[in-house]
Image (tube, rainbow, N blue to C red):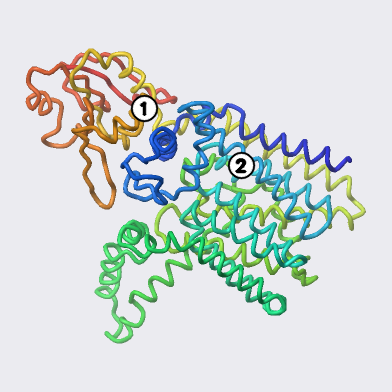
Amino acid sequence: MKSKLILILIVFLAFFLRFYKITSIPPSLNWDETSIAYNAYSILKTGKDEWGEVLPLHFKSFGEYKLPAQIYASIPAIAIFGLNEFGVRITPVVYGTLTVFLLYLLVQELYRKKEISLISSFLLAISPWHIQLTRASFESSFSLFWFLLALLFLVKGLKRPRFLVVSMIPFVISVYTYNTARVFTPLFLLVYYLLNIKFLFKNFKYLAFSFLTFVILVSPIIPFVLSGDATARYKLVSITDDAGLIPRIEERRNLSKLSPIITKLIHNRYTYNTYYFSQNYLAHFSPSFLFLKGAGHHQHHVQGVGELYWFQAPFLLYGLYLLIKRKSKSLKILLPWLLLAFVPVSMTNDSIPNALRTLIVVPVYQIFTAIGIYEFIKLNKYTKIILLTTFVLFSINFYILANNLYTQYPIRYSKDWQYGNKQVVEYIKEHQDEYSLIVFSRTYGEPHIFTLFYLQYDPARFQNSKNLERFETFDWVRVLRFDRFYFPDLGDEGTKYNDVIKANKGKKILFIGKPGDFPPEAKILERINFLDGSEAFEITTN
């Protein structure tokens, strides 16, 4: 009864840390959140996405082809609470909280020790890594939820093999949730089956059914994965990108003083890809990433703290040491989980080390830490001193996190979250009937999706807009115009303030752009600032 009460309190704490100020921290919805939400809204209202595709398995969105699970899962909350910040973010808050509960169930299934299970779930509840990525609509956190559910069934399957087949369903859903899972999940299952080959041969029919279930459920996505649309987007972030890799190789070869044969053996596509992969992979184990600074991407990490807490370091290592020393069967799950989690992201060249694409590994660190804490306290006669020291370190670390997240973060990084777009669209909504053309510069990203979202623009009307115009650049799709809205870059030649006026003689035009987009004589109707006080947008007219 006591452990159930503690678990309830942990789950409530997890919910509170994710729910508190959810509509204002992070300080605004980013373009991915608005895209996910508007496509969910479009499916809800019309059964089609923004491109007019009926119940798609891939959402073209900006041309990066979002996976479907997060979008479809967002529909119920948007239907209940509306197309707004709360309607978008309550979904990740809920599944983020449930993930904490799932970790308790999984650890209990692995070790049958309530203390370890409770500590593991508590650590995930307060995890800087997990909190940040479940306060906004990130697909990776939803993929983690499904992966943990799948693991729970997989572990149960070691005693009741029929659960092996059941586990394939959440495994497949994780693949339909986030691109990283497309690589990680099949790799994990392959290694897991190899490590448990004797058990699986004894239960071959369940293995066969599991394999067939996985393949059949994944098959609808395979043609797209093999298509040019999927590979084109991957090439933009891949370490194998010829546009960047080949020039680097040629430069090193030209500078080399070794013989031509030796030079080619050292400086070639294979050695360089291996080098960059290894460098990216090992970066995710650095103390700076894990315990001191965390990821550099401002949307993915609160900044000022590590992805894990300081106090976890010795307990984490001790827990891992004990599991290896005791040759724990759980390592057949935990080590592949840990070591394979960084493979997909290491094949990319942006935002390394990356917290978003590696979120799936977070529970492993909490499990190792929980085992270390449990065993260290159980065997050490200085329990009270250890607990007091740990509590003091945790309190300091948690205060830094809470202060950064709930007070400093939104002010410092509002620009990174495309803050100001909502305020712009609210101004547009109030004054749009006064103008025949509204020009909204795409300086900060994709203004059309914010316009659609905050105007709650009728999806059917958008899909069938006669003047809807899109264009593609570097495998990224931009909306140039629809209805009375026009989205150029006001800093480009031919689409500057005076150019637009000349091209639209006789029209009363509302302009939204960044500071410097308009001539000194332009009368500024409204200025919108980032939360740090710096100017974000200027609104003017002709």
Q: In terms of sequence position, does the residue under pointer 1 or pointer 2 come before the other?
A: 2
- Residue 97 placement, left or right of 523: right
Mark 2 = which residue? 95
- For the point 22% across and 27% down, the residue is 483
- Residue 395 placement, left or right of 44: right
- For the point 28% across and 14% down, the residue is 431
- For the point 67% across and 78% down, the residue is 197
Q: Quadrant of the C terminus?
A: top left
Residue 198: percent from left, percent from top: 71, 79
SS of the residue under disc 1 = helix
Between 507 and 400, the residue placed more toward the observer is: 507
- For the point 47% across and 40% down, the residue is 299
Residue 24: percent from left, percent from top: 51, 26
User: Which amino acid, by three-letter code, is at mark 2?
Assistant: Tyr
Between 352 and 76, the residue placed more toward the observer is: 76
Q: Residue furthest right?
A: 381
Q: Closer to the observer: label 1 or label 2?
A: 2
Measured along the vertical axis of the image, is residue 496 above or below residue 134? above
User: Disc 1, disc 2: CB below 8 Å?
Assistant: no
- Residue 485 placement, left or right of 404: left
Residue 356: percent from left, percent from top: 51, 49
Mark 1 neighbour class, 10 Å CA radius: few under 14, some 14 to 19, many 20 or more: many
Measured along the vertical axis of the image, is residue 199 above or below residue 112? below
Between 98 and 399, the residue placed more toward the observer is: 98
Residue 458: percent from left, percent from top: 34, 28
Tell me how far mark 1 sits from mark 2, CA to CA.
Answer: 27 Å
Q: Quadrant of the N terminus?
A: top right
Measured along the vertical axis of the image, is residue 456 above or below residue 312? above
Mark 1 = which residue? 421
User: Which amino acid, by three-letter code, is at mark 1?
Assistant: Asn
SS of the residue under disc 2 = helix
